[in-house]
Image (cartoon, rainbow, N blue to C red):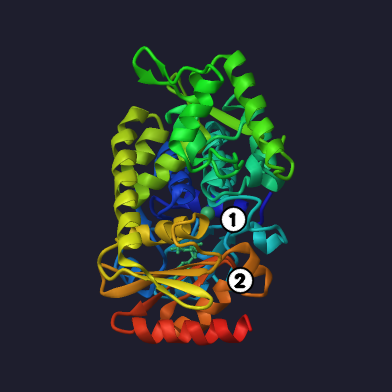
Amino acid sequence: MFRGLDEAVKEIRKADSIRLVSHLDADGISAASIALSALTRAGKKIHLSIKRQITPEVIEDLKQEETDLFLFMDLGSGYMELLEDLKKSCKSGLIVCDHHIPSKEEVPGIIHINPVLEGKNEDEVSGAGVTYFLAERLDPRNRDLIFLAIVGAIGDIQDENWKMGGINREIVEKAIASGAAEKERGIRLFGRMNRPVHKALEYSTNPYIPGISGDESAAIQFLSSLGIELKKEGSWKSLNDLSEEEMKKLATAIICERIRESEASPEEIFGEIYSININGDRLDAREMATSLNACGRMEQSSVGILSVLGVRPFDNINGIVAGYRKMITKYIKWVKESGPKETEHAFYINSGDQIHENFIGTITSICEKSSILDSGKVIFGLAETEDGKVKVSARAPKEIVGRGLNLKDMMGEVAGDEGHGGGHAAAAGAFIPTGKEKEFIDSCEKYLKNKLK
Ligand code: C5P
Ligand code: ZN
């Protein structure tokens, strides 16, 4: 497997106390769950924090701590210069388990485990996947944690069209062979365990169901016309509650609608569904990823971690997920009402303190993928942070990325050195000083005009 695993295992065996730092998304929380479980098993003293980002402030805080070993998960590779600074100031060991594109390959004293360093793609394994391989190398008993590597990959949307590739494929096959997960083929609808079927149809954008996606009453009508009851014993039926017969009827009808509206590849509505057994409950890996993401954004990662590790009932998460959905609805309403600034190439959602920094990325993504802003343009979300800066989230449609725009490069340039911009071509972020929003927007406009002329 990856370079650095054996060396990292040696460091872990030597250490008594280990300081874990992981990323505040479903992948990061999955990685943290793996590490927490594996290192507790190994009898280590653990201290874990979940962070939005590695920043100079985070590094300054870590410098004050005493530990034998730092372990960074699903973050760090993009900020090797900052980790180098931390490493220089302490005697502790330092391991990074990440899959983001490294800003620097080798740093003396840092064990850097990242498949990108071995010519792999950052999308073929998640931070949780990399952390899993370390846990497995440490102790074969940790193989029971492999399902979290599937959840992490799904959280990072590495299963394009609901099929995993590359190293993730090997992980899925291993998980199935060991009985840790089951795989079946089914209709690619989100929320098969928890969401009412008509809602799953309404929210489905991939596969797109002409006339039904985005229209709740059309979805209800569609199911009624197929003779599929919406409720069973007074409560909404989820996709999982449908009989085999109903499922077949539904699949055929969706394909027919797609043929009628000449959708490309109308029959491509099936995908792989991974289910995982936790304390006798069968859970969908996709829903686990959604739930962990919600826990992170609501700053309740610990509930997520304890639930996926089976220490607390998984149902405990439902209230957090409901709260998360409410926040999203509230913020989207605010975006619509406030009317973001629109220019030739972009929208700017300059939210001040109206949208929490944990949500600005998600809200910007939703606006880019939906018709809320009637977009097709680059979207920037700006939100004030608790430590007195402004967080920027940028998202670009595929078509614009195809014309040569790379948001990672753009954020790096526009936000400047202290802006710590980074990310990917289609999704990136940065921090800017409060009060510099207008200057930032002007610089973005100049950059976009030049790039997209
Ligand atoms: O925070 P947001 O969801 O907008 O981030 C989009 C992507 O950009 C993520 O992959 C995140 O890790 C990355 N990012 C970064 N540096 C920042 C902000 C975001 O690398 N300062
Ligand atoms: Zn990740």
Residue drawn at (50%, 56%) of the image: 74
Instruction: Tell me, for residue 7, which label it has, or none.
Output: 1
User: Observer-nearest residue: 43 or 115?
Assistant: 115
Based on the displayed image, in which of its 4 quarters is residue 39 positioned?
A: top left
Residues at marks 2 and 1 touching, judged by CB atoms closer than 8 Å: no
Q: Which label was assigned to residue 356?
A: none
Q: Is residue 404 left or right of residue 343?
A: right
Question: Which of the labelled discs sits on residue 106, or is there none?
Answer: 2
In three-dimensional space, the C-alpha distance between marks 2 and 1, rounded to whole angstroms, equals: 14 Å
Which amino acid, mark 2?
Answer: Glu
Residue 316 can be seen in this image: yes
What's the residue at 34%, 28% (across, down)? 315
Between marks 2 and 1 in the image, the one whose residue lies nearer the viewer: 2
Q: Position of residue 154 (x, y in %)?
A: 55, 44
Horizontally, residue 207 falls left or right of residue 384, namely: right
429 relative to 189 in the view: left or right: left
